[in-house]
Amino acid sequence: MYKKTFRALSFVIAIFISNNGLAQDLTWGATSDLSDTFQKAINPKIATSTDGTRATAVWLRWDIIQSASATISGNTADWGNVKDLSIAGQAVGELPDIALSDDGTKATAVWRAFDSTFGKYVIQSASATISGNTADWGDVKVLSDLTLDANIPQIALSSDGTMAMVVWSTLSVRYFVAAIPGTISGNTATWGVVKPVSPELEEVPSYPEIAISSDGTKAMVVWSNNGIIQSRAGEMAGAGYSEWSPVTNVLSEAGRIASSPRIANSSDGTKATVVWYRLDGSDYRVQAIPLTRSGWAVYQGAVKDLSAPGQDAYYPQIALSSDGTKATAVWYRYNGFDWIVQSASTTISGLTATWGTVKELSAPGGDAYYPQIALSSDGTQAAAVWRRFDGSKFIVQSASATISGATAKWGIATDLSIAGKSAYEPHIDLSSDGTMATIVWTLDEDPYDIVQSASAIGNDGNCYVIKASNGNIIMFCL
């Protein structure tokens, strides 16, 4: 139905040698156009299999949620046909979200849509089985209460793709974070009962996010409630059954505005790290806290400031090793002249997190915003992506790192999107061994916006990458 086109990556530097003796750098392949070139497509999200050889992306095209799947060999992705997931005319501009099974053969997506019968914004979902780069999507299901407006859905999926949990915020009449569990067989999901996770609030709770264990039985939810970061623990079993702990944990200090929490947990669901930004009295600072869980009880470590005082820092993201003992966070901070993407890594023992030195990933001289982070399962390899102003347009950039303890060595940022055109909304996923990455973003092709993607492979740190005159990327190693 839609034809994929390919574009050569525009590298500023033709020859690149690995930086600072990194054990791994990422070599990016050609850029693929995923969405139709004559439609406005925005808000892309990507999920990859643990081995990095499969990927599924979702995005909003005009008023329809769309998806495509790919098989990946090295840094070359073969994207299949675009599929329409939502009912035409219903989907609106809230970010869709996607989760994939470890083997990449099962996917579940969620999004916000407008139900004209009830006059409410509702949360919808669909599931798929995937063979190669062809996805068979099942029927659309409505998850939220049809009498309440809903917003910002987030999904987490078990490693085998058969259990899911979705959270969102309600927007009308009653204000709370809602959650629903589901079990999935093939491309058919059976959803359970919607339950309030937060207490009913005086204002709309913001930024709810969910993390679940790899077997799908343990869940942790975080959100912002009137400037306070809160969390709650849940358990799931059977067809759409869930129970939640009776106590809501307050993670941030009262009396200071805190927002945009993000959570990552260990594969067994017993360890987690949460990040957010919070007003310290004069500036917004990025903060983090480690959590451990035993049954219903959630134990909290000490809150640590990650960003330096004196200037504002915003919108942190967090990734955690599968055993929960290593984490890497990214955010952006003003340095007095530019907004710079920064990162820090930590080792975690019990409830004690030892954070290393903050590193600057983007170069000065151009504002950089909204970084995303992905981490290998052992926490020793990381890849980040963000958008940065190059003096004319915003471009998508990426950098990779090797991490030893709490010390990360980041390579030089690579330009991924086309020079001379603005790009935004980058999102990244990484294979479990950290050697393969796939990114999606939106390119401004006035008057249209196109969803694009690129994939990468890692080398051993003693390799050269050359861009040939025909645009091909060649790598040779000593």
Image (cartoon, rainbow, N blue to C red):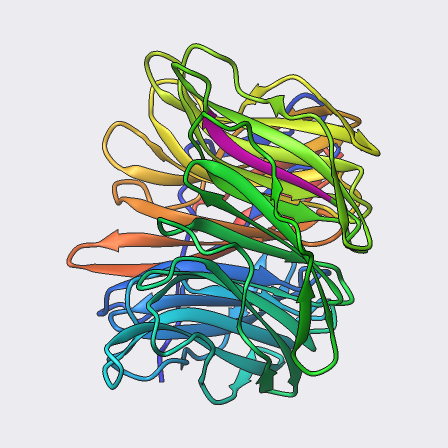
Q: Is residue 445 magenta?
A: no
Picture coordinates of residue 386, whole percent (x, y): 44, 39
| Rendered-image quadrant of the C terminus | top right
Q: Which residues are magenta?
A: 272-278
Q: Nearer the viewer, residue 13 or 271?
A: 271
Picture coordinates of residue 281, whole percent (x, y): 41, 15
Q: Is residue 418 visible?
A: yes
**Left or right: 174, with 287 as reference point:** left
Q: Residue at x 42, y 64 (%)?
A: 96
Q: Is residue 104 above or below residue 356?
A: below
Q: Nearer the viewer, residue 177 or 116?
A: 177
**Left or right: 213, with 179 as reference point:** right
Q: Nearer the viewer, residue 40 or 329?
A: 329
Picture coordinates of residue 349, whole percent (x, y): 84, 31
Q: Residue at x 60, y 34 (%)?
A: 329
Picture coordinates of residue 19, whole percent (x, y): 64, 25
Residue 365 location, quadrant: top left
Count of numbered marks: 0
Q: Is residue 471 visible?
A: no
